[in-house]
Image (spheres, rainbow, N blue to C red):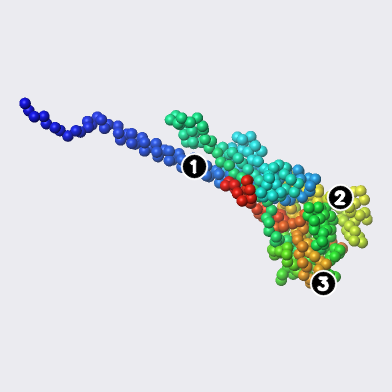
Amino acid sequence: MKPCMQRPFTAMPARQRGAVMVLIVIALASMLLMGALALDGGHMLLNKARLQNAVDAAALSGAKTLSQVGGDPDGYVAAAIAARTAAWNTLMLNASASGNGELSSGIGASGGVGAFAVVELSDSVYGPFFFPGPEDAAYVRVSVPNYKLTGFFWDFFNKNPFSSSNIEIEKAVAAIATAGPSPTASTCNIDPIVVCGDPAQYDPENGNFWGYHYGDLQTLTCGTPGSPSAGNCQLLRLGDSTGGADIRQAFCAGTEQCIDDTGSVDTEPGITWGPVAQGLNTRLGLYNGPVDPATCPPDWYIDYSEPLVAMDGGVPKQNEAEVVSSNGDLSAGGNQLTDVNDWKNAYIDCATSPGSCSGVAERRVLNVVIGNCAAVAGGGATSVPVLGFGCFYLLQKVEQSGEKEVFGQFMQECEGSGYAGPTPADDAGPNIIQLYKTYFSDVSTPSPDS
């Protein structure tokens, strides 16, 4: 009997066949999963950034329009509608830009921009936000809660047959932005005029701003009651630039100096009236003398009443009839004049129909210093304490001969930066409009999407 021989156990080749294939399949599946994650994740991040940029621009546009047409308690709903329309129009313009085709498709798939983006208003950056907002709304919030995106590999993993869950996760992004006026207390690029105000008459809640109320008609240069001194036409001193060309350009496009509302401003005696009239008239599309339309474009709305209003014994009159203001509506002898309310209505039409109006928005709004002229002693050049800044609507053209008068209707207290160049989209109004963090639960918790 032969002894049993023991041999080392070795697997049969047939038993190892296909093992490498399994590893390859697992590796390929993992690579596919990572690729899908990178593709869909990158796609989401890209569209999130594009959406946020569009929503930021929409909020800024809405807040800018609100600052320009708001301020009238009786017309706050129309102002809110104009702000919302401007925000939607800006969002659509961004969606129509090159590379944003998917955003445009998303807006269409949701039923239009009105269903895609929610526009709300508030009188505080902290809210509450709603539409049309309160009468004194100044902040605009634009939110897109659900922007659905193309799935690519997303749908495949949502329908994973090996998953026991029936819940599908939607591939979508959201964005929100809040915009409103800057809290800054200094003003730059103002129009070089000082208007006298009464420090004892400042009651903003009742619409009284240093003695001025909405729609009040006022002469802004020379002859103004309470002018700081004899021979002083209330023009700001422009540093070392006092020649006619400098004055013309300053009235054409504003000054570049910044003024704090706790300081004072220096005025210049006398007046170089020709350049003053030539500079201001560009805002009405009237060009006389060496003025450049590219630097000093006209307003969207250039209409005014004729014959012109003139002062007569300290009273504004047209055809010897006293001009009366009723909440901004001007009339003389029963005849209606073209006024700030007509400008507002025209502005809303222009803002809600981009490209329909030529010129530049809000060029007829003069951002001027309101000073305490009663505190000034002496003649000639003077230093006037600053009370604040006021927006006045340029009522009509300025005559180069005859009475040296610039008529304006008071609109509201002004802050921020006025128009300062040929690119109105960057800086077209008296207020600096900026983006803010979006808050929900309280003032210390901003939204992660803002």
- At x 8%, y 29%, the residue is 3
- Secondary structure beneath label 2: strand
Q: Amino acid at mark 1?
A: Gly
Residue 16 locus on image (x, y percent): 26, 32
Which amino acid type is marked by label 3? Ala
- Please rate how many residues cluster around mark 1, counting C-alpha atoms within 10 Å: few if below 14, some from 14 to 19, many from 20: few
Tell whether label 2 touches label 1 (CB within 8 Å): no
Residue under the point 82% across and 73% down:
378
Q: Is residue 370 visible?
A: yes
Q: Position of residue 203 (x, y in %)?
A: 80, 56
- For badge 2, the amino acid type reads Ser
The residue lying toward the viewer, choosing from 230 and 23, is 23
Q: Quadrant of residue 196?
A: bottom right
Identify the mark nearer the N-term, 1 or 2.
Answer: 1
* Residue at position x 66%, y 49% in the image: 126
Q: CA distance from mark 3 to mark 2?
A: 35 Å
User: Looking at the image, is mark 1 or mark 3 earlier in the sequence?
Assistant: 1
The x and y percentages for residue 32 are 41, 38
Q: Which residue is mark 1?
A: 41
Q: CA distance from mark 1 to mark 2?
A: 59 Å
Q: Which mark is residue 326?
A: 2
What is the crowding at mark 2: few (fewer than 14 residues within 10 Å), some, or many (at least 20)? few
**Alpha carbons under labels 1 and 3: distance apart:** 69 Å
Note whether residue 220 is visible.
Answer: no
Residue marked by disc 3: 377
Numbered tag placed on residue 4 in the rendering = none
**Circle 1 — which element?**
helix
- Look at 55% across and 44% down and name the residue there: 48
